[in-house]
Image (tube, rainbow, N blue to C red):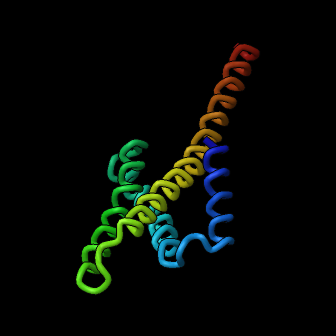
């Protein structure tokens, strides 16, 4: 998973550097990516810790806002499928990064809890 994220970020950086992606698409990608983090935690809190609900919410909310924005643009510039792809891509990557970081913190806590439990058992065996 970390290798996929690293590769995606590297390729995005190269694409931005070479100007193969229009500035508008980068803004859509970045905006959706940034909106994914609070959306993820909104889903996490609403579902009382269900990571799948958090992931779905993290992608769905930014995608919805991107769709609304593109729908409003129909009159002026027209609907852009490329902008929608950038919205979805940013939402997916933002959610994946948030999930990876958040789950890593949870993993650290679980490892620490297991270490404390083992230490308690060891001390119980010594003193009982």
Q: Quadrant of residue 66?
A: bottom left
Q: Is residue 24 left or right of residue 84?
A: right
Spot the residue most to the right: 126
Spot the residue most to the bottom: 76
Residue 63 location (% of width, % of height) = 35, 62
Residue 11 location (% of width, % of height) = 65, 58
**Looking at the image, which is closer to me, 50 or 24?**
24
Residue 31 location (% of width, % of height) = 47, 71
Q: Is residue 27 left or right of residue 120?
A: left
Of the 4 image quadrants, the one containing the N terminus is top right
Q: Quadrant of residue 81?
A: bottom left
**Looking at the image, which is closer to me, 74 or 37?**
74
As displayed, is residue 42 above or below residue 31? above
**Looking at the image, which is closer to me, 78 or 115?**
78
What residue is rendered at 41% in x and 61% in y? 85
What residue is rendered at 25% in x and 74% in y? 71
What residue is rendered at 74% in x and 17% in y? 127
Of the 4 image quadrants, the one containing the C terminus is top right
């Amino acid at each position: 998973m970390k290798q996929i994220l690293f590769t995606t970020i590297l390729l995005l950086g190269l694409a931005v550097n070479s100007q193969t992606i229009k500035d508008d698409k980068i803004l859509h990608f970045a905006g959706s990516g940034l909106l994914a983090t609070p959306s993820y935690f909104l889903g996490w809190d609403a579902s009382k810790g269900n990571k799948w609900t958090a992931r779905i919410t993290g992608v769905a909310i930014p995608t919805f806002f991107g769709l609304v924005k593109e729908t409003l643009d129909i009159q002026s510039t027209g609907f852009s499928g490329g902008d929608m792809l950038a919205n979805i891509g940013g939402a997916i990557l933002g959610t994946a990064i948030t999930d990876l970081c958040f789950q890593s913190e949870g993993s650290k806590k679980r490892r620490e809890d297991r270490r404390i439990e083992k230490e308690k058992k060891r001390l119980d065996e010594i003193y009982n």
